[in-house]
Amino acid sequence: ALRVLSLQPRTTARPEPAVAVNTELWAGASAVEGRDDEGFRLLLTQLCEMVGRSKNAQWTEMAFAAAMEPGQWSDDAARGNAVAALSGLARGLAATGQPLSRWLASTSDQAAEGVARAEDLFTRTVDVARSTECSSDDRNAAIEFLRYGTWDQVGEALLSIATGDDPAHLKQAAINSLRSFSDTAVAEELLGEFNAQTPAIRRAMLDLLLSRPAWCDVL
């Protein structure tokens, strides 16, 4: 389905039926022309989420392959489109009970290069999430995307933001993303920095810790 859009905000020729998920998706893809980056990425995320929810292995693999093509990594804007696409796929796969990290681990050898680029995408996104030179909106979007990575890829960065000196809304975003993980380090690190937080962040931390029985044992 991403090949319909080619990850670019423009109208394309009508695809073969096997590529178009349904007529509604095609209508949405055709309406992309003239949209700003935010509008295009929102549509891209929604489209890819529907692909992920479809439980159609061929569509999912095609969408992933198109998002991870080397040609889509020419600049920051293109990488932003890849993040939007992968976020949508991750949401769709999660709705079927399959986390993105598990899906990536189960892909065929033919997808190895794409998986490697996905890992690189998470590494780059960690840098954006932690960078004080990036805009608040870009950092917030990066932090939200990190919930789809593995703990080894993103855990330290999310904990650092949640417990550090970043603005409250970014700390809250990091705490929300930590809900995707079950590592005991989450409870230990948050409790270790609990007294240094504002009342609002303390409440957010407690809500998170009380959401998992294993973390409650650390309280």
Image: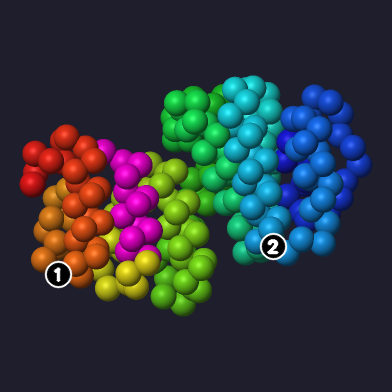
Q: Secondary structure at mark 2?
A: helix
Frontmost residue, 152 versus 7: 7
Q: In this view of the protein, can residue 15 be seen by the observer?
A: yes
Determine which quarter of the picture holds residue 192: bottom left
- Image height of 89 relative to 206, above or below: above
Q: Residue at image x 20%, y 46%?
A: 209
Q: Residue at image x 47%, y 51%?
A: 145
Residue 166 rendering spot, x and y as whole percentages = 32, 72
Q: Residue 135: which numbered mark, if any?
A: none
Whether residue 44 sits left or right of residue 91 in the image: it is right
- Label 2 Cα neighbours within 10 Å, binned few <14 / some 14-19 / many ≥20: some
Q: Residue at image x 37%, y 50%?
A: 177
Residue 70 rendering spot, x and y as whole percentages = 67, 49
- Image height of 199 relative to 146, above or below: below
- Image height of 135 relative to 56, above or below: below
**What amino acid type is highlighted by mark number 2?**
Asp
